């Protein structure tokens, strides 16, 4: 077989392997474990109330109105439960499907826009991240995963796909910008203001590149589309429930969590850094410092998706670190953006071992990044099989 045919075979086989592993990681034994307190059981209660009442807009539990979260995930899960029946599998299906689409969609995007190496590294970053697939890894309390009946994976998927849409917009596709803005609105309707991230990152990128005036009209259009998507539900809820909804949804869920350690979930400003350094949630962040350093050195030359990923990782990590309420699953949105940084770095990798003396930093980055990704992926596969 010629080298070209081998390369073609690898390019064909790799997406199939990534899809297969994605199905395994996201859906294997999905319904085998009991629902966790408190969030999974609360979310189940909300879904049951939707199906019992037929009311898609006013979320409730058996104890009364539920103002904490927007309705999108609950509506989608209620439809799933209605179709295939109530079970742990059906309650977790939307979360698992979102995780699967995120892994596959982002990996295939990296394959198309960057390289085969990028797709492999991006998918390995997901598959090696323990926290995405296991409850409370390393004895850190963490019940939100791609396997849990929670809202995180749906919102994260919508945020990442929105950013991909905006990247195509900057390459000349106005239609993709409109789609991205619609997805941004859906991200807000899934789990609140973090969903505005793609639009905010687009604004910051254009401001940094001094191109705001050129894109001002489009930005206003994109913001308008996002508001049109989210406004009806928020106007309805504010009109009907007034201050009770506003305090619970914005005050308690956002402002209070920033200012005070709610429900005993307080820790030092270094808590998340310690968690990421231990290697219990994912390969230790220390191992990819050489890689991150190479990205920072190229900051001005990075493309939109890589630039915004680096800004998000630094900015979001700083935000959750200074917040008074510390919950392990606040780390979940970081992982896809770290995957993008690792994948983009891999696209330009032309390491020749014989020339390692001339590429010392690159050699260190390869060893400290690639090897842990492979090892952790193998360990996670074993953990899912025997768990």
Image: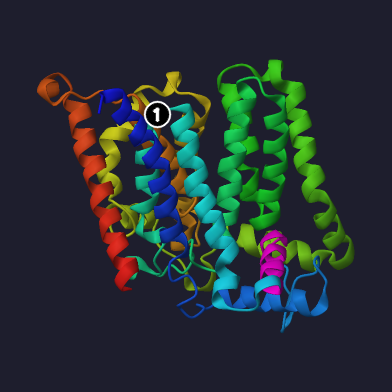
At a point 57% along the width and 35% down the height, the residue shown is: 164
At a point 20% along the width and 27% down the height, the residue shown is: 361
Q: Is the residue marked by circle 1 packed among few (<14), some (14-19), or many (20+) residues within 10 Å?
A: many
Is residue 324 located in the magenta-colored stretch of the structure?
no
At a point 54% along the width and 50% down the height, the residue shown is: 101
Say left or right for 156 vs 229. Answer: left
324 lies above or below 304:
below
- Which residue is situated farthest in the right direction here? 239
> What is the x, y in percent for residue 357?
11, 22
Is residue 73 located in the magenta-colored stretch of the structure?
yes
> What is the x, y in percent for residue 256?
61, 62
Q: Which residues are magenta?
A: 68-82
Query: Is residue 311 in view from this perspective?
Result: no
> What is the x, y in percent for residue 378?
26, 56
Say left or right for 246 vs 133. Answer: right
- Which residue is situated farthest in the bottom direction here? 62
Quarter placement of the N terminus? top left
Q: Quadrant of residue 98?
A: bottom right
At a point 50% along the width and 35% down the height, the residue shown is: 109
Quarter placement of the C terminus? bottom left
The image shows a total of numbered marks equal to: 1
């Amino acid at each position: 077989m010629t080298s070209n045919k081998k390369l073609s075979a690898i390019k064909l086989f790799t997406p199939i392997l990534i899809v297969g592993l994605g199905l395994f990681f996201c859906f294997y034994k999905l319904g085998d474990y009991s629902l966790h307190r408190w969030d999974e059981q609360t979310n189940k209660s909300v879904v049951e109330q939707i199906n019992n009442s037929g009311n898609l807009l006013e979320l409730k539990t058996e104890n009364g109105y539920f103002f904490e979260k927007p309705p999108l995930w609950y509506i989608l899960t209620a439809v799933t439960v209605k179709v295939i029946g109530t079970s742990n599998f059906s309650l977790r299906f939307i979360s698992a499907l979102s995780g699967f689409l995120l892994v596959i969609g982002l990996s295939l995007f990296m394959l198309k826009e960057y390289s085969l190496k990028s797709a492999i590294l991006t998918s390995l970053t997901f598959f090696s991240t323990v926290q995405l697939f296991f409850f409370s890894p390393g004895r850190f309390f963490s019940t939100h995963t791609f396997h849990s009946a929670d809202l995180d994976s749906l919102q994260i998927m919508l945020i990442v796909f929105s950013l991909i849409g905006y990247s195509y917009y900057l390459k000349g596709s106005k239609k993709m910008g409109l789609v991205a803005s619609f997805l941004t609105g859906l991200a807000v309707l899934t789990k609140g203001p973090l969903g505005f991230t793609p639009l905010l990152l687009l604004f910051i990128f254009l401001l940094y590149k001094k191109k705001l005036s050129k894109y001002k009209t489009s930005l206003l259009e994109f913001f308008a589309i996002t508001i049109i998507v989210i406004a009806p539900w928020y106007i309805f809820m504010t009109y009907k429930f007034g201050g009770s909804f506003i305090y619970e949804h914005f005050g308690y869920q956002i402002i209070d969590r920033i200012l005070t350690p709610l429900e005993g979930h307080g820790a030092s400003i270094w808590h998340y850094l310690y968690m990421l350094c231990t290697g219990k949630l994912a390969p230790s962040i220390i191992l990819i410092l050489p890689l991150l350093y190479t990205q920072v050195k190229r900051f001005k030359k990075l493309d939109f998706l890589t630039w915004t990923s680096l800004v998000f990782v630094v900015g979001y990590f700083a935000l959750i670190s200074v917040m008074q309420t510390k919950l392990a699953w606040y780390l979940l949105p970081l992982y896809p953006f770290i995957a993008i940084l690792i994948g983009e770095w891999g696209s330009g990798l032309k390491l020749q071992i014989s020339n390692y003396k001339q590429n010392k930093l690159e050699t260190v980055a390869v060893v400290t990044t690639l090897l842990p990704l492979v090892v952790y992926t193998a360990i996670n596969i074993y953990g899912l099989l025997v768990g």
